[in-house]
Image: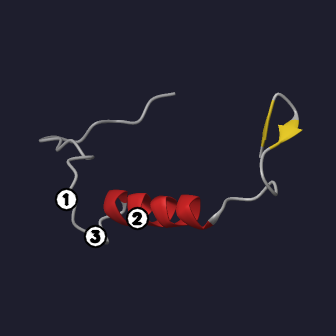
Amino acid sequence: RSIDRITVGKGQPGPITKKLLERFLSIVEGRAEDKYGWLTQCNQPVAATR
């Protein structure tokens, strides 16, 4: 990764970023409980838009 074309760290996600990403994905994919209120329940299907 870079900011303004300057590499940040080693250019790869570190252990904390990896852990946060895995936790977030497990919640949004339904593999873990949403203890943090990150999701909003939809009572009816909503079509994806671009």
> How many angstroms separate mark 1 from mark 3 (CA)?
9 Å
Side (left or right) of 5 relative to 8? right
Q: Which residue is mark 3?
A: 32
- Where residue 18 sits: x, y (%)? 57, 64
As displayed, is residue 34 above or below residue 1? below
Q: Which residue is mark 1?
A: 35
Q: Amino acid at mark 3?
A: Ala
> Which residue is located at x 20 percent, y 47 percent?
37
> Which residue is located at x 78 percent, y 52 percent?
9
- Where residue 35 sits: x, y (%)? 19, 59
- Where residue 13 sits: x, y (%)? 68, 59
> Looking at the image, is mark 1 or mark 2 earlier in the sequence?
2
> Looking at the image, is mark 3 or mark 2 earlier in the sequence?
2
As displayed, is residue 8 above or below residue 25? above
Q: Amino acid at mark 1?
A: Lys
Side (left or right) of 10 relative to 48? right
Q: Which residue is mark 2?
A: 23
**Closer mark to the observer between disc 1 and disc 3:** 1
As displayed, is residue 31 above or below residue 34? below
> Which residue is located at x 87 percent, y 36 percent?
6
As displayed, is residue 5 above or below residue 25? above
Q: Secondary structure at mark 3?
A: loop
Residue 45 vs residue 38, the one in the foreground:
38
> How many angstroms separate mark 1 from mark 2 (CA)?
11 Å
- Where residue 8 sits: x, y (%)? 78, 45
> How many angstroms separate mark 3 from mark 2 (CA)?
8 Å
Marks 3 and 2 in Cβ contact (< 8 Å): yes
Q: Secondary structure at mark 1?
A: loop
Give the total of numbered labels.
Answer: 3
Q: Which mark is residue 24?
A: none
Q: Amino acid at mark 2?
A: Arg
> Which residue is located at x 21 percent, y 41 percent?
40
